[in-house]
């Protein structure tokens, strides 16, 4: 009985010590995550100017869901996600496999591909703004060599989303490459040696060994990439302001416009709640469904 009490007491002290270490983080998590989320949910049931908010129940949600601009923004974000995530992951995996080999200059190449990651998105937007400038931009000057005319890449609704996707892929592929490099360096070498002895070709080794063993890394990188496709909107403020005609507008930038341009806090809160639900749904699908399909 005495021994059990000592074990219980020791376990309680151990748990209390762990909770004590986590408590400061929990305070900041409550202040900057839980409280703003709950406040947004509360505000989403109110409408009107900031100083004269009135309870409107679900009417605000009905108005937002019936809004054509909101639907266009959601469609833009889906296109943006589909355009950036698979291509970025494919390029990152390809670069990581290529640079994981022992060859001269691999460290320099890794640094070069990772370099866009350390540049702030605002600075990246300014660089690509120069590239996409009609007539004087780098892209138009290059295309002039082949006889092409001037193109307003950012001013044309048919091209603005494509050029935005290209820019984000350029920025993010190197970042995801680092995760794949770490994953590749932890793969068991004896499996590859056994495959070589059996006469497996490089493509067969990739298909049956590398790709399946990298699936945990792919799942993690995919969640990060999908999250980024909803968070990366700084470039819109510099390059297009969501235009032309909302062709490049994304959900987070639409929230910014509603809150700080139109000062409609109720609508901004509704859009924020929708964004949170989308992000939670994607994360839950990845971890509760896709995670079970992966063998660690």
Image (cartoon, helix red, strand yellow):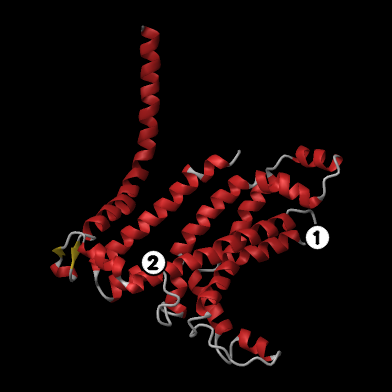
Place of residue 248 in the rendered image (x, y in percent of width and height, measured from the top left): 45, 75
Q: Mark 1 points at which residue?
A: 104
| Quadrant (top left, top right, bottom left, bottom right) of the N terminus | top left
Describe the element under mark 2 as helix, strand or loop.
Answer: helix
Q: Distance between the residues labelled 1 and 2?
A: 43 Å
Q: Establish if 167 lies above or below 62.
A: below
Which image quadrant for residue 265? Answer: bottom left
Q: Residue 252 carries which label?
A: 2
Percent x, y of residue 109: 71, 63
Question: Which residue is painted at 61% across and 46% down in the image?
Answer: 215
Furthest-front residue in this view: 66
Q: Which of marks 1 and 2 is in front?
A: 2
The residue under the point 55% across, 69% down is: 168
Q: Which of 53 and 186 is in front in this view?
A: 53
In the rendered image, the vertical position of residue 232 relative to residue 24, given as above or below: below
Horizontal and vertical percent for residue 100?
73, 53
> Looking at the image, how many numbered discs can be counted on the residues?
2
């Amino acid at each position: 009985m005495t021994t059990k009490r000592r074990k219980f007491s020791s376990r309680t002290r151990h748990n209390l010590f762990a909770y004590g270490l986590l408590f400061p983080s929990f305070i900041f998590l409550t202040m900057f995550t839980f409280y703003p989320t709950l406040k947004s949910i509360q505000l989403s049931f109110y409408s009107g100017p900031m100083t004269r908010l009135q309870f409107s129940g679900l009417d605000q949600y009905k108005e937002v869901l019936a809004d054509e601009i909101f639907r266009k923004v959601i469609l833009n974000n889906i296109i943006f996600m589909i355009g950036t995530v698979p291509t970025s992951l494919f390029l990152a995996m390809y670069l990581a496999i290529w640079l994981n080999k022992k060859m001269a200059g691999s460290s320099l190449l890794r640094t070069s591909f990772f370099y866009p990651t350390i540049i702030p998105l605002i600075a990246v937007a300014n660089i690509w703004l120069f590239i996409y400038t009609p007539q004087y931009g780098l892209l138009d000057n290059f295309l002039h060599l082949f006889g092409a005319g001037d193109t307003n890449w950012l001013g044309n609704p048919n091209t603005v989303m494509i050029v935005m996707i290209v820019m984000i892929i350029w920025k993010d592929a190197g970042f995801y490459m680092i995760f794949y490099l770490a994953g590749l360096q932890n793969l068991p070498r004896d499996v590859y040696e056994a495959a070589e002895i059996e006469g497996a070709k490089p493509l067969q080794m990739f298909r049956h060994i590398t790709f399946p063993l990298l699936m945990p890394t792919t799942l993690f990188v995919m969640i990060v990439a999908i999250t980024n496709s909803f968070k990366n909107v700084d470039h819109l403020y510099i390059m297009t302001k969501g235009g032309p005609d909302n062709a490049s507008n994304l959900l987070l930038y639409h929230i910014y416009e509603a809150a700080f341009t139109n000062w409609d806090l109720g609508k901004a809160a509704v859009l924020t709640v929708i964004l949170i639900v989308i992000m939670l749904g994607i994360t839950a699908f990845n971890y509760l469904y896709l995670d079970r399909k992966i063998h660690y």
